[in-house]
Image: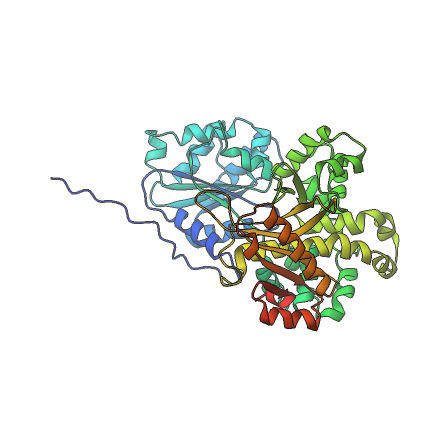
Amino acid sequence: MKEVIMPSRPRSDLPRPDDMFDRDREWAALAGFAQDPTPGASLGIVSGRRRQGKTYLLRALCQATGGFYFAAEEATDAESLQRLGAALADHLDVPAPLTFRDWNEAVDAMLALGNDSPTPVVIDEFPYLARANPRLPSIIQNALAPLRLERDQSRTRLLLCGSAMSFMGRLLSGGAPLRGRATLELVVPTLDHQRAAEFWGMSDPVTALKVNAIVGGTPAYRREFVRDDVPQGPDDFDAWVLRTVLSPTSALFREARYLLADEPELRDTALYHSVLAAIATGNTTRGHIASFLGRKAGDLAHPLTVLEDCGLVIREPDAFRRNRTNFRIAEPLISFYHAVMRPIWSDLEHTRDASRLWRTAQPRFVGNVLGPHLEQLTRHWLRHLAPEDLLADAPHQVGSGVVNDPTARTSHQLDIAAFGFADNGPDPLLAIGEVKWGDIVGRAHVERLQHVRSLLQANGMPAADQARLLCVSAAGFTPEIQEQANTDPTLVLVTASDLYS
């Protein structure tokens, strides 16, 4: 009987670059894909919003493995083929540029790079090429077809990368040509608030929260955009805002506008800016957005869907009424721009000193930026980062919602609604909560949550009587409530420091 030798498992022990921060999972996935010894060329898709470090990861991967990296540009199809031929010639160290009649020949040339050993081949900003030649995904599909000699004798690990989230999301969806062809689909996310604070080197939690509410977890905003200008503590935060994001000479100043311009799907930018402005100023339902714009709610189905596809807006169902949907902006810098900067844009462009403008913008910054950002950050922390014993069980879903009070003919907004998981029947309620940025939480806040808990219990919400009351405040708590939390296990107090523990 003939012995069958199976290929070894993909290795993921490729040394990380010394200056790489975090990205352990992403690097391990890319290294394992690039070094996979399995016969046959394979395809990987890498996506993520701009400035997250995708290009850095892929360049580092090619440098570590001797792979080929090609950065596409906005160009005609013919020019892109010429540029690729020149780049391949330089990689192969041949004297003259390679000439390709079409992309079929070019793709086969890239597959041939892996004839001897596993070799990563990266095409960065792939949407530029596909925009000039919409047939390119189909060409790659055919090049990677089973039983095709050029594919079978190659171990090229082809990686297509792009930041146009709507386009990259469609590459592998539905009946797209590359559907079922990729063995790696990697989305490079923004850093969460804890990793972002570590990356920025900030130890004060309140300052870290403020900075995160403006720039989020995008790595490039510290290095390339503000050149390592980091707030030196609470007393330096306002000055940092003035010399970075509110300074017309800073790369951050116009970045939010460029983020929309970079998305090819956002053709009517005026409409999309207005939709984002509505959400940033607290209009989070479709009806409220429509009222802000002076349009019918049905007219917003398409622009909201496009913003979702681009990764700029996130749709979140009400925790208690699934037919009610809220929208929030995914990129903190866009929220800051629309809530704080856009209303005073002309003044910011022409003033010599923006200190007065920043002082008058404080109510908008606190109410429309810091407050909502802390709420969302808390929900993420509770779902993914909180201590395991904080609640009675691990939360399966964490959202926000509205609870009706029919007796009082009113309703109560809950910033936190955490649910466990049930194999059969509705999920049990683990906690309800309130999040405050500048308010010291006291008895009135706790009593309101107790009342809402009783309403949910009366409505038959599973495990509502055991649900924890979660109070989150960046400003702190009254001594009375702190003492109550020491004796009442259902009352949980969370400080800004806890969010970074």
Number of callouts: 0
Q: Name the one closer to the observer, 115 or 415.
A: 415
Colour mapping: rainbow
What residue appears at the point 48 percent right and 48 percent down from the top-left corner?
421
Residue 88 visible in rendering:
yes
Q: Is residue 66 above or below residue 500?
A: above
Q: Residue at x 55, y 37 (%)?
A: 168
Does residue 168 appear to the left or right of 328 in the view shown?
Answer: left
Q: Is residue 249 visible?
A: no
**Residue 86 screen position, x and y as percent:** 52, 39
Q: 298 and 302: which one is in front?
A: 298
Q: Locate residue 494: give its quadrant.
A: bottom right
Residue 419 coordinates in the image, percent (x, y): 54, 50
Q: Residue at x 73, y 42 (%)?
A: 276
Which image quadrant: the N terminus?
A: top left
Give the residue displayed 32% in from the left and 36% down from the top: 153
- From the top left corner, tell me how far across and down residue 249 is, in percent: 78, 55
Q: Position of 426 compared to 373: left or right?
A: left
